[in-house]
Amino acid sequence: MTVSNLPLFSMLRTRMHWHQERQKLLAENVANADTPFFEPKDLAPLEAVSSAVPAVAPLKLARTDPGHIGGGTLGGTQFAGARGQVFEKRPRGNAVNLEDEMMKVAANQMDYQAATTLYGRSLGLIKTAIGRR
Amino acid sequence: MDFLKSLTIAASGLKAQAGRMRVVAENIANADSTASRPGGDPYRRRVPTFRAEVDRALDAHVVALGRIRPDESEFRTKYEPGHPAADANGYVKYPNVNTLVEMTDMREAQRSYEANLNVIGATRRMLQRTIDILRA
């Protein structure tokens, strides 16, 4: 059994690959921020690998009294989070919004950091198991 | 290695914006360059163009500075009969450079340059994080 075969590590690896690829696309968008007729691109969000992770039942508030209003599930908000189409376009047909791209770069970096930290911690877990610390 | 690709793409952006800056500097420096002989044409403003270029090795759209084209608009004229470059009617042609336009162009190039630098910084930090796994 190698480390890379563990589902947790392979999932994190997929995630890190996804962030790398996204960083490449974002770099392309920023580099072409002044190129005529350039449309920015982004990666489709990473889908959860359902086969590797057993489905987690959504967390619910318990009703201790029949008079309580039932609490909704806590999974995400009901609002549409992502803006769909870009609506801003320059006269030369360039649709890159530099602020938007900067936000995406920062978000990408933070998510990547989360993944690598998690990876490091998981490695530490295994090291603990084999008694290295 | 995808991070190196990101770095190369951002570097192509830096290079293109630096080239644009060079053209802007040229225009500003020559904003008052008249012809050397009477009735001749003065310096003509130059316009940088950008184009997206597919880099086969990187499999990505890098940006490159395209041809630098002349601005075909009219020259400014001033009535200066004593000027060495004045034509028969005493008019001197000055370059079609508008310093205000060049300044805004320069600012835009500066902002885009900074944005590319930002991407390089972010990519570098991500790369550093990956290396930090080894140290954990």
Image (cartoon, coloured by chain):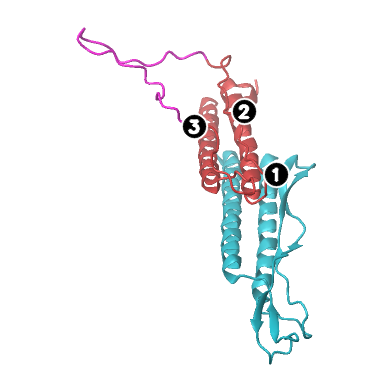
Chain in red colour: A
The answer to which quarter of the image holds residue B70 is bottom right
Report how far apart the C-alphas of labels 3 and 2 lie in the structure: 22 Å
Residue A120, percent across and down? 54, 34
Labels 1 and 3 within one chain = no
Residue B99, percent across and down? 59, 71
Identity of the residue drawn at 57% across and 28% down:
A45
The secondary structure type at the circle numbered 2 is helix
Return the residue nearer the eye: B15 or A119. Answer: B15
Check the residue under mark 2 and report the chain it is in: A
Per the rendered image, the range of residues in magenta is: A54-82
- Looking at the image, residue B61 sits to the left or right of residue B129; the answer is right
Does the magenta-highlighted stretch encompass residue B30? no
- Which label is found at residue B5? 1
Labels 3 and 2 within one chain = yes
Return the residue nearer the eye: B126 or A97. Answer: A97
- Amino acid type, callout 2: Thr
Hue of chain B?
A: cyan
Check the residue under mark 1 and report the chain it is in: B
Q: Which residue is mark 3?
A: A82
Q: Nearer the viewer, mark 1 or mark 2?
A: 1
* Quadrant location of the N terminus of chain B in the rendered image: top right
Mark 2 crowdedness (10 Å alpha carbons): few <14, some 14-19, many ≥20? some
Residue A4, percent across and down? 64, 25
Q: Are marks 3 and 2 in contact (CB under 8 Å)?
A: no
* Quadrant location of the C terminus of chain B in the rendered image: top right
Q: Which residue is mark 2?
A: A14
Residue extending farthest to the front is: B89
The secondary structure type at the circle numbered 1 is helix
The secondary structure type at the circle numbered 3 is loop
- Amino acid type, callout 1: Lys
